[in-house]
Image (spheres, grey):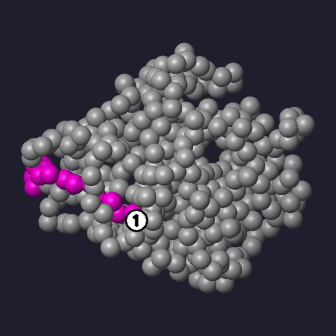
Amino acid sequence: MASTTIAEISRLDLQDLSTPPVASITGVKHLSSYNWIEAPTPTIAVPGSPPLWSAPRFPRQLKKDSGLIYIAQNAARHPDSPLEPLFRALYIANPLFDIRSIDVVTDRNNIRKLLSFINPGSTRNGLETFTINIEVTKNTAIFSREETATHEFIGPHEFRGFGHEFEKVYTTSQISGSTGHHRIISYRFGDLSFIVRHETDGYVDADTRIPSSNSKEPENDSLSSMLGSLSLSPTNRPPNTTPNTTLAGSKLTIKEEGRVVPIGSTLEIKTRVFHKPLKIQEVAPQLWVSQTPKLVRAYHHKGTFQGPEIEDVAAEIRRWEGGNQRDLRKLAALISKILNVVKGCGGNAIVKYDEKRDKLVVRKVDRKKMLPKDLYSKWDDKDNSEAETNTDHDAGAEMCGIERAT
């Protein structure tokens, strides 16, 4: 895959970018969801369901994680088009959804990586080399994460903690054969409209009482209160209402099974050894990008977990957003800058963090389409279904040259 460098962006360059006065997430909506199913061919269940939080009443000794662990399950199970499940699930839940109104479609992971470039201290492990593939159709940019490895195998003599075993014991799968639940939400950030996909560890039953991390916060200002009242897409069908389907030109099999779980019920699970408490600042960027309002911080002593509790951390996440406006304004400006560069250079590029030079490098590339052919018709005008998808950007390719961020 040949590539040409078209832009380089340093951290210092970000000082000169025009930033919005406020960079906050607004207008959060649940769009769809799905589960990956263990099957001989790529198979998802829509809307699926996250596992239900069902903690044992007494302390439990767990075995350490072992075996197959997914790093990027969408790419591992469907390497031909890791983003196809997002779009299939979206249009099952919302057949008339207007994708042309969206500026960026991305995984949560990509936004977190760009934020880690702006502030390397925002991630626990520091800033590491990363690559994001970008394809623009009409006015919509698709960000596809790229990983050196999409999965790993933990051997019997290796130790990687207890996180996966904890989830097996403390949650109950709601979908037979499920290997992971993915959520698809939309919101505005800065001046852009986003669709964000992310994995969800579980959800809490509506009858469960959860202490708020800030009892003094007025309820009508609470993120979790807002999320809990969101209207849901009409996909709350009985399970197995239709047979499995595979669309022409696609290798993905789709089952309609599960039920919609509101965003306000979703939670993130983190496990730690008891003498290394997890600070909210360490997990806030992840929860912020996906607007996940609930958190379980589970501590263990040599693999024995006591009684972990679910926390409503929505108020803390909102406070984190307010206290990190400098970085978030830069994030909004950086994403806008990347979009402008890629759109002006033909609509196909990769963004790579060059660790040696401590810069983001944008390269124009020539590669195959990210999605099956039929999905591109979603960007076409209703009276022109055969329109070319990238003609809006081809004219700008000739003018593309190496530039510095300004």
Asked if 129 appears above or below 356 in the picture, the reply is: above
| Magenta residues, start to end | 301-314
- The residue that appears at 45% across and 52% down in the rendered structure is 228
Viewport quadrant of the C terminus: bottom right
Asked if 235 appears above or below 184 in the picture, the reply is: above
- The residue that appears at 64% across and 26% down in the rendered structure is 250
On the rendered structure, is 41 left or right of 173? right
* Residue 35 seen in this snapshot: no
Residue 175 x, y percent position in the rendering: 38, 28
Residue 240 among those drawn in magenta: no
Residue 274 x, y percent position in the rendering: 14, 61
Q: Residues within 10 Å of mark 1 (few under 14, many from 20)?
A: few
Which quadrant would residue 273 be assigned to in this image?
A: bottom left
Q: Mark 1 points at which residue?
A: 219
- The residue that appears at 37% across and 25% down in the rendered structure is 177
Residue 116 x, y percent position in the rendering: 47, 68
In the current view of this chain or complex, which residue is farthest to the top?
243
- The residue that appears at 60% across and 25% down in the rendered structure is 251
